[in-house]
């Protein structure tokens, strides 16, 4: 069975098929390139499956995925499915972000912080904070977004805010007062 057919079998919930597929594939530049291409496929199921595997491989430390950081970031502005967006957002903390990717992220992430999906909002906020930690210019807007997110109706977003505030003291009231 070819890769695209295998990705299409994903039901959107149970990842056992994707796990088996991931284990059966070689961790090669060609496989990563193929998955990146499928992450832009017309079929949303194929996109979700491809980004799920790329995320899994990044978690495993597959260097070919790490070297594809710019390609992964370039997926984000064009991704329409929240699961594809989430997978890319969850990969961001493990990627080295180039200047070109930084420009894309500073444009895309503020909109995703307002996304209807609570998980996308939470992970977009994490990405925005990580960028602002490296750029004082972004901090004022990010602090405002964090303040708004503290009152988000979704517990997952509020939990992400608490995790962020533990890692980045400048995001808390006390941390802002000392700067």
Image (tube, helix red, strand yellow):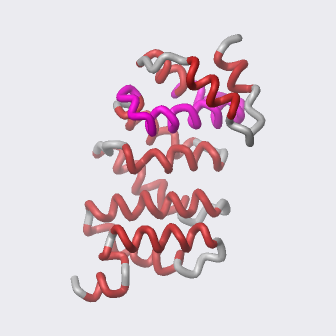
Quadrant for the N terminus, please.
Answer: top right
Across and down, in percent, residue 47 comes to 63, 33
Looking at this view, name the residue that lies furthest to the top.
1
Instruction: Please determine whether, in this image, residue 7 is positioned above or below residue 157.
Output: above
Q: Is residue 47 left or right of residue 126?
A: right
Across and down, in percent, residue 75 comes to 51, 39
Whether residue 20 can be seen here: yes
Question: Magenta segment: does it hold 41?
Answer: yes
Residue displayed at 52% across by 36% down: 56
Instruction: Please determine whether, in this image, residue 121 is positioned above or below residue 94.
Output: below
Instruction: Please determine whether, in this image, residue 23 is positioned above or below residue 120.
Output: above
Across and down, in percent, residue 19 comes to 62, 30
Residue displayed at 41% across by 31% down: 65
Across and down, in percent, residue 128 comes to 41, 61
Looking at this view, name the residue that lies furthest to the left.
179
Whether residue 42 can be seen here: no
Residue displayed at 51% across by 33% down: 54
Q: Main secondary structure of the magenta part?
A: helix
Question: Magenta segment: does it hold 162?
Answer: no
Q: Can you tell which quarter of the image residue 163 is in?
A: bottom left
Bounds of the magenta segment = 36-64
In this view, the residue in front, 14 or 45, is 14
Q: Is residue 58 left or right of residue 112?
A: left
Instruction: Please determine whether, in this image, residue 55 is positioned above or below residue 125.
Output: above
Residue displayed at 41% across by 18% down: 29
Q: Can you tell which quarter of the image residue 141 is in?
A: bottom left
Quadrant for the C terminus, please.
Answer: bottom left
């Amino acid at each position: 069975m070819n890769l695209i057919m295998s990705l299409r079998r994903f039901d959107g919930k149970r990842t056992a098929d994707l796990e088996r597929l991931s284990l059966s594939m070689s961790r090669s530049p060609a496989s990563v390139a193929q998955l990146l291409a499928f992450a832009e496929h017309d079929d949303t199921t194929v996109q979700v499956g491809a980004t799920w595997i790329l995320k899994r491989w990044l978690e495993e430390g597959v260097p070919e995925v790490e070297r594809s950081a710019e390609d992964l970031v370039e997926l984000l502005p064009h991704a329409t499915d929240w699961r594809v967006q989430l997978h890319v957002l969850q990969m961001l903390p493990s990627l080295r972000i180039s200047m070109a990717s930084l420009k894309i992220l500073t444009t895309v992430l503020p909109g995703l912080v307002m996304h209807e999906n609570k998980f996308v909002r939470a992970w977009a906020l994490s990405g925005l904070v990580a960028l602002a930690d490296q750029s004082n210019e972004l901090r004022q807007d990010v602090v405002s977004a964090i303040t708004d997110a503290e009152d988000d109706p979704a517990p997952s977003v509020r939990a992400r805010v608490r995790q962020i505030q533990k890692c980045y003291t400048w995001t808390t009231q006390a941390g802002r007062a000392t700067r």
